[in-house]
Image (tube, helix red, strand yellow):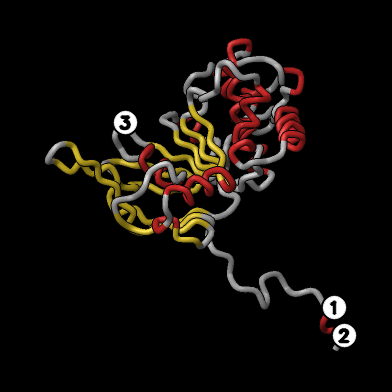
Amino acid sequence: MKGDAAAPLVKGEGMPPSRPLIEVTELTRHYQVGDISVPALQGVSLSIEQGEFVAVMGPSGSGKSTFMNLLGCLDVPSGGRYLLAGEDVTRLGPDQLARIRNQRMGFVFQNFNLLNRASAQENVELPLIYARVPATARHRRAREKLAKVGLADRAGHRPMQLSGGQQQRVAIARALVNEPPLIFADEPTGALDTHTSLEVMALLQQLNDAGITLVLVTHEQDIAAFAKRVLTFRDGRVVEDRLNPTPRRAGPNPETNPETKP
């Protein structure tokens, strides 16, 4: 009947259940040092839903960076399975992994990883060049993302003409320029002072509020407090996986975060 066809479905009714954005099962990574196999990751199994903000913590050598590199397709596992939006990326070759990194992921690093001789806009355009986006669209999208991070007036500046916080904002704009659903941030505040760290975390939280999934590696409890979920690694294993029901807000909110009140 026409009326039946037009009636809205109850949320979830008649639709297959959505899969997690990330699913890993018994994920391992071993490095060969001479005749010795050194385990960096040992049988990690977990999932991350679309829209989560996950902080990954642990001491040096705990496996947290190895875990992020595997999720970001920057490295390949020694064993186990990794599904990204239902696709088994452990079966893909280098070119296919590069395409996934370019089209479905954004990366933010502690040391910004900007090209010193290129302007802020040219740095933001790099993923679009790899994706073979025409120049006119490339320029427009890069300017839009720089405006989004508050640097529209710095598009022509080179990294050395920018503060550390501004350089990290350029890096975030670059991570966003291909509209990825997933962003990995490896110690994004590690080279910044406290005030600038709060500015960067406020921006990351805004992106998460807009639906982007964030996986952030940090060794700082204060930074992990901004996340909705915290994974703690030790000796290549997850030893704690906990939800944070009241994440700290980096933006000015006198009621919940008076220390960031302007």
The answer to which quarter of the image holds residue 162 is: top right
Tell me the mark number nearer the camera, choosing from 3 and 2: 2
- Residue 33 seen anywhere in this rendered image of the structure: yes
Residue at which label 3 appears? 60
Q: Which mark is residue 2?
A: 2
Q: Is residue 187 left or right of residue 122?
A: left
Q: Nearer the viewer, residue 189 or 245?
A: 189
Nearer the N terminus, badge 1 or badge 3?
1
- The type of residue carrying mark 1 is Ala
* Secondary structure type for disc 2: helix
The answer to which quarter of the image holds residue 221 is: top left
Residue sticking out furthest to the top: 161
Q: CA distance from mark 1 to mark 3?
A: 57 Å
Residue sticking out furthest to the left: 35
- The type of residue carrying mark 3 is Ser
The answer to which quarter of the image holds residue 53 is: top right
| Circle 3/circle 2 CB separation < 8 Å | no
Residue at which label 1 appears? 6
Q: Residue at x 71, y 21 (%)?
A: 155
* Secondary structure type for disc 3: loop
Q: Nearer the viewer, residue 1 or 139?
A: 139
| Circle 1/circle 3 CB separation < 8 Å | no
Q: Residue at x 37, y 56 (%)?
A: 45
Residue 35, percent from left and from top: 12, 41
Number of residues whose C-alpha sits closer than 10 Å to that of mark 3, classed few (under 14), some (14–19) or many (20 or more): few
Q: Residue at x 69, y 44 (%)?
A: 210
- The type of residue carrying mark 2 is Lys
Q: Nearer the viewer, residue 170 or 123?
A: 123
Residue 48, percent from left and from top: 50, 53
* Figure quadrant of the N terminus: bottom right
Q: Is residue 215 left or right of residue 34?
A: right
Q: Residue at x 51, y 25 (%)?
A: 113
